[in-house]
Each structure stands twice: as C-alpha cells, then as structure tokens.
Image (cartoon, rainbow, N blue to C red):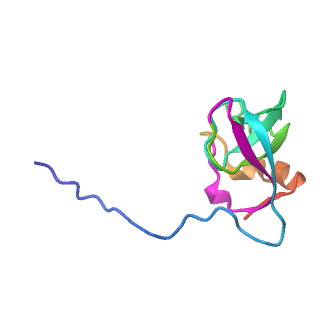
Amino acid sequence: MGMDLTRQDFSTAPGYFIAGTNIGITTAVKEAGADLPAHTPVLLAADKVTPVAAGAEGRAPSAAGIYGITADSAKAGEDAVIYLTGEFFAKGLALPEGVAAADLEIALRDIGIFLK
C-alpha cells in the first residue's frame, strides 16, 4: 500500500478574477465557436467567439480580432457571456500553451480590459 507524501496546499480562500471596481464591467453574449473555459481571452469572427491561439513557433499570438474574456465556461454552440471591459487579474486568465498574458495585454487594453 503506497502513500502520497508530496506536499499539498489546501485553501478555502476564493479565487479572485475581477481585480477592481474603478472601471465598470460591460458584458455581451455571443455564440461559442469552440469549447471555452472560464476566463479565456477570445477572438470574434463570423459572430462566434473562439479562444486565442498560440502563434507560430517563436512568434507571439495574433491578437487581431480580440473581443474580450469569457465570464464562465461554455460549450461550442452555446451562448457565452463575454467581459468587454473591466479590470482583471492576469494570473486568473485561462491561456493556451504558448500564450502569455503579456502577449495580449496591449490588445486587451485597447478594448478597455486592464490586467493587473
């Protein structure tokens, strides 16, 4: 019988994503073009939202068409609530492999989303 002796940290503290109240949060509802986890930066094309993808090897992801950040998870074909403005913690973003919050910070700032 084996025992797991690795260190485990437990907490009852909530995971905060909304960072401030200085900027009002605006939302919209769009159809998800793919499965979307909560807090994923999304692109808008053909009136559907899809997650931001990593760029080609060694290149930053394309932020052209960036629309906002998902409030909750949504399956493809379902309505997804999207944050269009507001202040959010960068560590709370659900980013695909190869994408860093710094890669999207300026594009998000241009549409009224500020990362802390």
Boundaries of the magenta span: 75-95
Is 17 part of what is drawn in magenta?
Answer: no
Report the side of 14 relative to 90 (left or right): left
User: Which residue is at 62% across, 57% downward?
Assistant: 92
User: Which residue is at 87% across, 56% downward?
Assistant: 112
Vertical arrangement, residue 105 with respect to residue 95, above or below: below
> Residue 45: percent from the left, percent from the top?
83, 30
> Residue 15: percent from the left, percent from the top?
56, 64
Is 91 part of what is drawn in magenta?
Answer: yes
Which residue extends farthest top?
46
State the image quarter where residue 37 is shown. Answer: top right
> Residue 12: percent from the left, percent from the top?
45, 69
Vertical arrangement, residue 1 with respect to residue 46, above or below: below
Vertical arrangement, residue 95 with respect to residue 32, above or below: below
> Residue 74: percent from the left, percent from the top?
63, 39
Q: Nearer the viewer, residue 32 or 15?
A: 32
